[in-house]
Amino acid sequence: MPITLTRRRFLTTPPLVGVAGLAPLLQALAAEGSLETTTVQLSKDFAICEAPLDVAYELLRAEGFTDIRYVDTSADEVFAAVARRKVDFALDFPVLFVPAIDSGEPITVLAGVHVGCFELFARDDVRSIADLRGKTVGLKASPPALLRLMAAQVGLDSAKDIHWLTAAEPSFNPLDLFAEGKIDAFLGFPPEPQELRARRAGHVILSTAVDRPWSQYYCCMVLANREWVREYPVATKRALRAILKAADLCATDPMRVARRLVDGGFTGRYDYALQTLNDIPYNDWREYDAEDTLRFYALRLHEAGLIKSSPNRIIADSANWRFLNELKRELKA
């Protein structure tokens, strides 16, 4: 259901955005021309790692958007919300949205935002993914395909060598089972790793923020509906600029961003939000290659038999780097 942040709420909340950068922004807006639409809808889920989308409100207002809506979206339906134009922009993980592109969904990938979200926790006697042979691994919201790719990297067949437990029923919580020592491992993303650390459950055997090859590629990438991008190119660039500048804010002012996430109803725990913001390198969005990320995950998914299209076809069908390339020049560190 759409949530429109009200003008009153905006005016009574201390701003994240100062006035120092307004002159260059006003020059850029004048050069780009008028917005084709002043309404923008953003995906809202409760993954803390998607903070740049969650705190982009003021930056979107500065870009000229006047009707900014956050639409509740569960982690496993983000790409579908983009494809059906329930939202205009979202952050999502390639393992989730590349199969949707492969099936013909009208999704355009515009940029990468950050690396690293997922952490694989295990009991003390499990030291690596190879040790998961014959073990039980829990997944609550993480994509099963990611564990499949991780297992394949070390020669395991996840369908045969690993027993999976997923949160198929609302009352069934694999995270709790792992924390209670009833299963061997758990793959999670914020705020799940933060909760496990708070409960002193297990240890991390793989982090996509630091362990290769995963740490070399974006985790969250910016998605938009293909037709929306075609219809509203000026609005697309301005919305993307707001999201990328919000990523910079996550890196430079994590305490204020964490408080904004709590105050805005995006998460309930300030400490989990702050830990996530400090752990994820949000200021590295300029450094990694978005096309390499799509190619890497498309190749892995193709090798695993999870998509039919080649990486080149995925990139040709879905990628539009024009706005990102322009913004990298404009938003130099």
Image (cartoon, grey):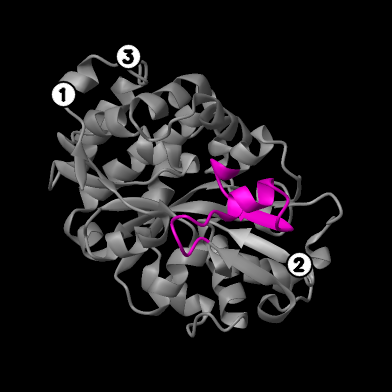
| Local crowd size for mark 2, using a 10 Å CA cut-off: few (<14), some (14–19), many (≥20) | some
Q: Please name the residue that numbered disc 1 is placed on.
A: 7
Q: Please name the residue that numbered disc 3 is placed on.
A: 14
152 magenta-colored: no
Amino acid type, callout 2: Lys
Q: Estimate the spatial distance between the alpha carbons at disc 1 and disc 2, rounded to whole Å.
A: 52 Å
Q: Please name the residue that numbered disc 2 is placed on.
A: 135
The image position of residue 40, as x and y in percent, is 20, 45
| Numbered-mark total | 3
Assign a secondary structure to mark 3. Answer: loop
Whichever of labels 1 and 3 marks the residue nearer the N terminus, that label is 1
Highlighted magenta segment, given as a residue range: 167-192
Q: Nearer the viewer, mark 3 or mark 2?
A: 2
| Local crowd size for mark 1, using a 10 Å CA cut-off: few (<14), some (14–19), many (≥20) | few
The image position of residue 245, as x and y in percent, is 41, 34
Assign a secondary structure to mark 2. Answer: loop
Q: Answer yes or no: is residue 216 visible.
A: no
Q: Estimate the spatial distance between the alpha carbons at disc 1 and disc 3, rounded to whole Å.
A: 13 Å
178 magenta-colored: yes
Task: Tell which of 163 and 285 is nearer to you.
Answer: 163
Q: Nearer the viewer, mark 1 or mark 2?
A: 2
At x 44%, y 37%, the residue is 51
